[in-house]
Amino acid sequence: MTGVPARVVIGLDVGTTGVKAVAFGLGTSWRTLAIREYPLLRPAPGQEVQDPTVVVTAATAALTECVTSAGSAEVVAVSLSAAMHGLLALDADLQPISPLLTWADGRAAEEAAELAGQPVALDLQQTTGAPVHLMTPLAKLAWFRHRDRPTWAAAQWWVGLKDYLILWLTGTLATELSSASGTGLLDVSSRDWSTLALDACGVDRVRLPQILPTTAVLGLGRQVAARVGLPTGTPVAVGAGDGPLANLGTAAITPGVAGLSLGTSGAIRLAVDGPHPDRHGRLFCYALADPLWVVGGAVSNGAEVLRWSEHALGAEASTTSARTPPGDGSEREPAGPIADSSDGVVMLPFLFPERAPLWDGDLAGAYLGLRHEHGAEHLRRAAVEGVCLQMRLLLDRVDRCYPIASVRATGGAFGSDLWRDLMAAALDRPMVVVGGEDGTALGAAVLGLVAVGAAPDLESALVLLGGVTTGRPVTASAEQIALFAELRERVPRLLDALDRTVTTAPAVPTPVEP
């Protein structure tokens, strides 16, 4: 194939609603992308799961297409990225006996609340670097123990999405430090499973996989190799979680430079030199590649909120499904008309159980300040502003501990001018949109080059793959910045007014029996 370099590395990024396989040429900016999508299933209210066989089928197809596009180029490694916080039960034959409970699954709300209310909660946060929340496998395991005894008894292994991918590709049952650090089960000091956390959820450590460094390399298994068109034994770098790799893929790995990603969900992370658990329990701390870790938080409600509003208000694009969002976010302009101003309407965008910095899965979404003159276009505008306000709240929380001078943003949502402009105004920090939909896959590829010894360090690997584009600076107008400053003041007033309305409302008379 004309123009294809002699050597490539493939970043395989497996997410909540789709998989991306990207081949990056060594010593050039050449790359090729293959995407496959799959649904996020909702078998019952509050449950958000994946079928692991469907995910693997999609990953196989994307990887095969990517390998084919790379032609005769030597694939020096396949390096993995995967969504964090999932939990899957396997039997003794390493076959799934449950769906994969994703980060968005809310069934463990009661178990998480009970744990969070115990004196051990702060010790768990300090030990594991993960807030006590229903998203974590810690809480999900407690749910299985109390609510699904047959699966609990039958499960020989408890694994995450990354662990299942490693097993599929290499035949080795293992996890890696980054994904393990998002489980709520890892002792970040010892880099081993935490006895404190295991006791809290009741799981035996022999039912958890071994923990490898994020730069560990295994060999591609014979059957998968034949299926995707690669030689048996091709190096497979186990990689890291998708959040930390998003920072690496946008070169947000220096002090003061935050990485922001916005797709179905959203996150802000800052690189630090080693594990720094938040003693207040509001921020996470996840591994990337020693000594580099990231601190920050993730919101559960990102660009999906706008897609929901389009669907609910009758303006959804014909090619989009509310339950099967494209890629990792809104890679298009909004489907329906959006007002230039929300005209006083505020949305609390809590459609999924919310994570940082509130860590309250019971919060529900709401529109506040509604009047007769408001229409669907105002509600859609308020949906975008509500997400941006939550990201500002998260930025302020991180900034309180680790000052943020600038933001490097990535994600499918930033294909939209509206998302770019309003996010820049809400954050009120110098913001550059970098990369495209392959940013996390680039982070995986960079880590993979270091893992196989093709680059001495992360910075050199970034250069070897053509580096990260300088990006597009987004300049917010003074008017938009002032608008968000007013919105930040308006929300507490509206909530206070709502609270007064509820608490002072006259009691409903009790019917008197005749």
Image: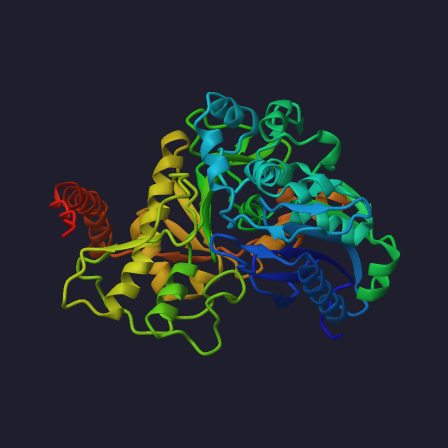
Q: Position of residue 427 (x, y in %)?
A: 33, 47
Is residue 456 among what the camera can see? no
- Side (left or right) of 44 relative to 397: right
Is residue 352 among what the camera can see? yes
The N terminus, quarter of image: bottom right
Residue 254's place in the image compared with 42, above or below, is: above
- Side (left or right) of 514 relative to 378: left
Q: Tell me the quarter of the picture where residue 337 sits.
A: bottom left
Residue 327's place in the image compared with 199, above or below, is: below
**Residue at position x 56%, y 40% from top?**
143
**Residue at position x 39%, y 59% from top?**
305
Q: Position of residue 138 (x, y in %)?
A: 58, 35
Residue 351's place in the image compared with 36, above or below, is: above
**Residue at position x 61%, y 37% from top?**
145
Q: Position of residue 261 (x, y in %)?
A: 47, 52
Q: Position of residue 324 (x, y in %)?
A: 52, 66
